Image: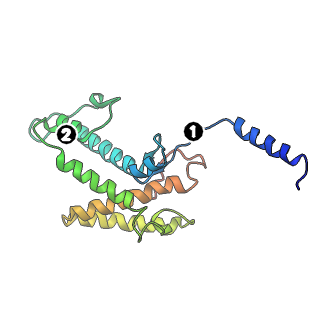
Amino acid sequence: MGHPLGCFGHLLWMLMLLHLPLREVHGFFPNIWSRTISFSWGSITHQDMTEDAILNITLRLFMETPHPTKGKHIQEEDFKGKTLLADDIFAAFYGPEVSAKRFRAAIAEVANANAAMDFVNTTRDDPVFHFDSELIHSTNARLLQVRKEVLQAVRSEQYGIARKMLGQLLHSLQDFYSHSNWVELGNEEIHLDLV
């Protein structure tokens, strides 16, 4: 039989735990199903980050590039405070008559390749694909190689391969910030030497 005050110690411990302030924790998951299964609605996914990045870069490109026949630029103010959507960006640049269907499919291809890195047998447990096990130099070397391969695939017009490899590259890049202590060390800027 335990000490008579042992029960009191357990009770005190439980009361302490109950009175600790609850803090919201944000993380990110590979895809929407991971977020759904874990009931983590406030978190974002690798897919979310990838789609947002592609849409932001596309918006920036369209703001800097005049329309091929109309010569006009789209304005950043038109998108301030709004959720970026491929259809809205395309309509602002090309007009409503141009469909963004193929662009949406290309974004999905990159985002799905990104999320697959956490599920495919050949990549999910390999630390070089995820900036794990302190393999920063090996993973960075892989990033630089994949970057070359993406550019080579684009030059040879193998766009499907380029999109898949870009998704994989972005996954590893996103993992650098979440799996390393870069942010905890006080760094607020991107690491310029990664890619």
Disc on the earlier residue, 2 or 1: 1
Secondary element under disc 2, as helix, strand or loop, is helix
In terms of depth relative to the viewer, which is nearer, 23 or 139? 23
Q: Residue furthest front?
A: 1
Relative image position of residue 105 (x, y in whole percent): 22, 52
Question: What residue is shown with label 1?
Answer: 24
Residue at image position (48%, 53%) is: 191
Relative image position of residue 38 (x, y in whole percent): 49, 48
In terms of depth relative to the viewer, which is nearer, 180 or 195? 180
- Answer few, some or many: residues within 10 Å of disc 1's Cα (few below 14, many 20 plus, some between 14 and 19): few
- Answer few, some or many: residues within 10 Å of disc 2's Cα (few below 14, many 20 plus, some between 14 and 19): many
Of labels 2 and 1, the one closer to you: 1
Relative image position of residue 103 (x, y in whole percent): 21, 49
Would you say 189 lies left or right of 171 here?
Answer: right
Residue at image position (29%, 28%) is: 77
Cα separation, mark 2 vs mark 1, equals 36 Å
Would you say 91 lies left or right of 186 here?
Answer: left
Relative image position of residue 193 (x, y in whole percent): 46, 58
Residue at image position (42%, 49%) is: 45
Would you say 132 lies left or right of 152 here?
Answer: right
Give the residue type that dot 2 points to. Answer: Phe
Secondary element under disc 1, as helix, strand or loop, is loop
CB atoms at circles 2 and 1 under 8 Å apart?
Answer: no
Mark number, residue 90: 2
Give the residue type that dot 1 points to. Answer: Glu
Mark number, residue 77: none
- Judge whether 176 appears above or below 42 on screen: below
